[in-house]
Image (cartoon, rainbow, N blue to C red):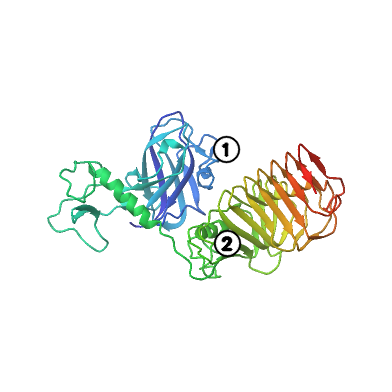
Amino acid sequence: MAAHTYWRLYIGAMQNVYAQIGTVSFLNAAQVNQSIGGVATASSEYSSSWEAGNAFDGSPATEWASSGHAASEWIAYQHPSPVDIVFVGVNVSASYPVSGLALQYSDDGVSWSAASPLYLLAGQPALTSGSYTVLGWSASRRPLVVVDGRIKELPEGDTLPPQAPAAHTHPATSITNTPAGGIAATNVQAAINELDSEKANAASVREKLTAARTYYVRTDGSDSNSGLTNTSGGAFLTIQKAVDVCAALDLGIYDATIMVGVGTWTAPVTLKTLVGAGKVVIRGVNADMTSTVISTTSANCFDGVFVGHYRLQYMTLGTSGSGDCVQPSSAGAVVSWIDTKFSACDGSHVVAFGGAYAYAAGSYTIAGGAYAHITAYDCSHARIVGGAVTLTGTPAFSAAFAGASRDASLVIVGVTFSGSATGKRYSATMNGSILTTSGETFLPGDAAGIKADGGQYA
């Protein structure tokens, strides 16, 4: 297939008043999301809270909704450069089901191709399940031929014989007298679905690292670059693109490093599940804590529901409006930090939810206040063990410097604090526990800590 700049998801029918979709991902042959760094549009939007861009932010919790029950609706994405789309990932609201999904493409956003039906790949959940579903489309399929009694796609480089009939790309004639060892299908569409499943399995084979790898992100880069060289023509434009590329690898035993260039980066980053024993290090390109700044508005700097280990280094983190600097939110999620400066934050500098693990890997600086510096909830665990934590400017913590609640735990031992802060030193509630072994006044703050509802401090 050829690459095109504009791709859109066409919705043929809605079973309720609105079309409502949480996630749309236009995917390449390796099922890597290509819809990053571009512009989202739609046939209609229910309101500014339900805009088209919500479907491309990587979170199913933020959704696009159409303004009404039109004869047809669509949601489109203008990519920064032409891309070749083979699959489409969608998360459709179970309360507002849709059907008749099809794919279209354009080079100018005005003249569109004919709508090509999308098919549910074998093993994928139904669109009505409310889960993320990957779909294939007929235009990405090569002609069907019979090889050794089995229906297969024509191999790349081969051509059909002169007298061969045209291949079917839609449900049609029944297949009868299937040879022994052939596909146990009752019609062409069933055979196509099986082929789609085989294609998806082949396309999902991950590249396995045989050595450590470094990707670069720069303000003058492009997400259509390889990310492998520190130049405007080689580096990525967004940290999110680099994270997505790392998440598509098999790290094996090696680490991948994302070198983030000098500047202030305002887009939130969603951390993704990693494969392999290695970790992903996201660090400033210069070995200091001021050249690379992550500063978000009403959003977390780094968050995600994932499995794997991410390390943050040589950067300043801060938020305004709302949001936490670091927020891992699932069992198996690990985030560590070292040589990092935490500036003013409306949420917590570090907060772990849902069984996640967050820890300081060495010394760092606190230069701004927050709701709390470090907190853990819901069976999560966080640690600051060893190293030095430097507080500058007397940061204020409106809840407490450290907090543990709902069966979560904090361990803060062997660390040297310098500087001062205002606010409660700790808050341990609802069976949360905090261990310092150093007494009630060990943690920064100017007010006594609190214990309630089974909370423990020792």
Of the image marks 1 and 2, the number of the one nearer the N terminus: 1
Q: CA distance from mark 1 to mark 2?
A: 33 Å
Tally of marks: 2
Q: Nearer the viewer, residue 165 or 420?
A: 420
Q: Secondary structure at mark 2?
A: strand
Q: Quadrant of the N terminus?
A: bottom left
Say which mark, if any, is on residue 280: 2
Task: Give the foreground label among 1 and 2.
Answer: 2
Give the residue type at disc 2. Val
Q: Residue at x 35, y 48 (%)?
A: 136
Locate residue 403 relative to residue 140 in the image: left or right.
right
Give the residue type at disc 1. Ser
- Res 159 quadrant in image: bottom left
Residue 180 visible in rendering: yes
Q: Position of residue 385 (x, y in %)?
A: 74, 59
Q: Residue at x 22, y 47 (%)?
A: 168
Locate residue 261 relative to residue 288 in the image: left or right.
left
- Res 31 quadrant in image: bottom left
- The residue that label 1 is drawn on is 49
Q: Position of residue 297 (x, y in %)?
A: 66, 48
In the picture as drawn, the residue positioned furthest to the top comes out as 17
Q: Nearer the viewer, residue 137 or 152?
A: 152
Q: Residues within 10 Å of mark 2 (few under 14, many from 20)?
A: many
In the picture as drawn, the residue positioned furthest to the left comes out as 163
Q: Position of residue 405 (x, y in %)?
A: 72, 42
